[in-house]
Amino acid sequence: MRSSRGPSWLALAVIGPLVVIGATASKASETVRVAELPRQTHIHGLAVDRQDPSRLLIATHHGLFRAGPDGRAERISEVQDFMGFTPHPTDPKTLFASGHPARGGNLGFIASTDGGATWRQVSPGVKGPVDFHQMSVSSADPATIYGAYGGLQVSRDAGRTWTVVGPTPDKLIDLAASAKASDTLYAATENGLLVSSDGGKGWTTVLAGAPVSLVEVTPDGSLYAYVVGRGLLRSDAESLAFATVGDDFGGGVPLHLAGDPANPARLFVATARSRVLTSTDRGQTWSEMGAGGS
């Protein structure tokens, strides 16, 4: 997951002692249609709600929303900026994020254990409090979490402590940890898609020649990447044998992707203009969320 602050090419084309973040008084109940979100806020991340897979969690500049198949979204958190948003790969109630409180500053590495209603700081991170715009949790080892702030940081104890592995890849846009090995990590950059097999110490180019606006490993282990000019690509079981799925996103560039743990064919994307689209055929065709009750 990454920041919504567009890169240059986009203009062209178990948790320990915690510190409470924010005041409950700042939580504001609000229900809007998903289609109205682009006029109100930026979207920073998506996740299918494992407690109720019919619903989608939408992390935004102004809080966390939970949307139903009718296309209506209710804000379920306090009003703060959720960056680097990502779900725990096995615990349905646990979510991770970083970002900024409404009053300004950085949140550090934060977690929710009640489905996003309340959030606590787990760690400030190295030279923190950090603001991880790109962050990913390994489904191969959920205690391994990567984040980008002042270099590539990694935690091997579910976010309690962090170390700097090294510099992030040049012009980084997104990160995704492998479902097969906790030391394998993918990076979407303005120059292409990269892979590291040693926890981010060294990188090899997988796809070159065009910006990659997102990379995501879905719950079934599929690796997705959106390559500008080629479309959405998928590699089965992270074999790095990519095939183009499709490129019909209504003229938008997708920045965030989420897969349904219960149904690998069901995907969601948020575009650079904060439109939320859904697919029921592994990304070949897309429709606006809420249209036709999808």
Image (cartoon, helix red, strand yellow):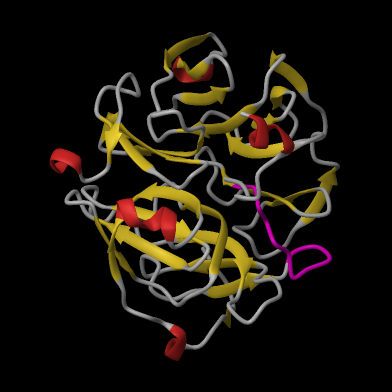
- In the rendered structure, does residue 68 fall within the stretch colored magenta? no
Range drawn in magenta? 125-135
> Residue 158 in the image: x percent, y percent?
59, 58
66 with respect to 192 (left or right): left
- In the rendered structure, does residue 126 fall within the stretch colored magenta? yes
> Residue 212 in the image: x percent, y percent?
63, 27
Residue positioned 38% across, 73% down in the render? 117
Quarter of the image for residue 206 reads: top right
Magenta: predominant secondary structure element? loop
Furthest-bottom residue in this view: 25
Above or below for 254 versus 117: above
Residue positioned 67% across, 52% down in the render? 156
Query: Which of the pair 46/178 is nearer the observer?
Result: 46
Query: Which image quarter holds the C terminus?
Result: top left
Residue positioned 38% across, 57% down in the render? 37
Quarter of the image for residue 113 reads: bottom left
Whether residue 82 is visible to the viewer of this picture, yes or no, is yes
Query: Which of the pair 212/111 is nearer the observer?
Result: 212
235 with respect to 182 (left or right): left
Whether residue 49 is visible to the viewer of this picture, yes or no, is no
Quarter of the image for residue 221 reads: top left
Count of all numbered marks drawn on residues in the image: 0
> Residue 150 in the image: x percent, y percent?
83, 54
Residue positioned 50% across, 18% down in the render? 231
Above or below for 204 versus 122: above
> Residue 286 in the image: x percent, y percent?
30, 28
Query: Which image quarter holds the N terminus?
Result: top right
259 with respect to 53 (left or right): right
